[in-house]
Amino acid sequence: MFFTGFYNLIKQKYLIYALVKRDIMGRYKGSIFGVIWSIIEPLVLLIIYTVVFGLLFGLRLDDDPSLTSYSLYVFCGIIIWLAICEGLNRCTVVVIENASLVKKVIFPGEVLPLKVVLSAIVHQCIGLLVLLVGVLILRRSIPWTWILIPLLILPQLLLTAGIGWLVASAGVFIRDIRQAIALGTLCWMFLTPIFYPASIISNFDQGRFAFWLTVNPVAALIHNYRLILLRGELPDWAMFFYVLILGVILSALGLWWFNKTKKAFVDVI
């Protein structure tokens, strides 16, 4: 079932490419700044978090107290989180928004959640380019390990798409899932070391919540992105394979469940 479902997706690669392209082009249709908004949003969040947590609260990295290093740390986390958050939240309504396509018997509805996840990752890549430019300006060099970005995108894609297929199916039958996921991702963001050092969770209440960093796949993803982009180090392979295996399991489960339930979509939407 796992290989069959993904083989069918591979056969639809040209359709997926066309849908992703249309999604990206359509998002900023009629917009003055266009794709530049993909840069503006994380930059605005960076300024807010840097001012609030970096200047007002005085948060800094344990091994580097400079504000520039903290800003790069936060920016890297924001870029990855926005892509994951956007993908999951848009998946909750993607089937309903494309009801005319889903009602066509020959249309492979499972490509719709994958479309929004890939679209979010494309915008993430734009943000990562901005991050690399910032690293080059502030540190005068870019670590060679940036070439490992595609390696980290793979488990991220599997993880987000897997959850996306599950919430996309649930969103058809339970309309409240949109609000639930929005609230859930908000809580998830504050429980993930995006704008504060991971040591805060590790040391909080005598380390009783340190396990959360171990089981939180987004924390593992962001940590590895920071290693290759900001520190010039290889990924933490234990974290990498944890997220990869979890992503494979969730993507297989999510795709299977979506295909199992999609026959009933027409009766509901």
Image (cartoon, rainbow, N blue to C red):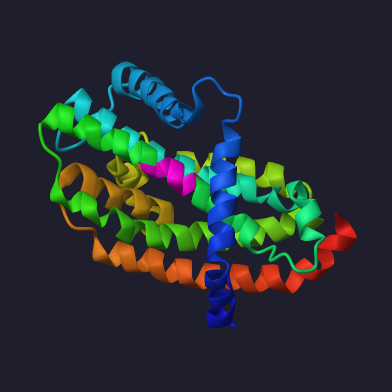
In magenta, the rendered stretch is 120-125
Residue 154 percent location from the top left of the image: 39, 62
Magenta stretch containing residue 122, yes or no? yes
Q: How many marks?
A: 0
Residue that appears at 56% across and 38% down: 25
Q: Nearer the viewer, residue 193 or 166?
A: 166
**Left/right of residue 66 with respect to residue 245 in the rendered view:** left
Q: Quadrant of the C terminus?
A: bottom right
Task: State which quadrant residue 114 falls in.
Answer: bottom right
Question: Residue farthest to the left?
Answer: 140
Residue 256 percent location from the top left of the image: 64, 74
Q: Is residue 21 above or below residue 32?
A: below
Magenta stretch containing residue 259, yes or no? no
Q: Is residue 96 above or below residue 243?
A: above
**Left/right of residue 154 with respect to residue 148 in the rendered view:** right
Q: Quadrant of the N terminus?
A: bottom right
**Left/right of residue 174 with respect to residue 242 in the rendered view:** right
User: Can residue 90 be seen in the rendering of this structure?
Assistant: yes
- Tell me the chief SS of the magenta region: helix
Q: Nearer the viewer, residue 90 or 109?
A: 109
Task: State which quadrant residue 258 falls in.
Answer: bottom right
Residue 107 percent location from the top left of the image: 72, 64
Task: State which quadrant residue 47 falls in.
Answer: top left
Residue 261 percent location from the top left of the image: 76, 69
Residue that appears at 38% across and 39% down: 126
User: Can residue 192 be seen in the rendering of this structure?
Assistant: no
Q: Is residue 176 above or below residue 39?
A: below
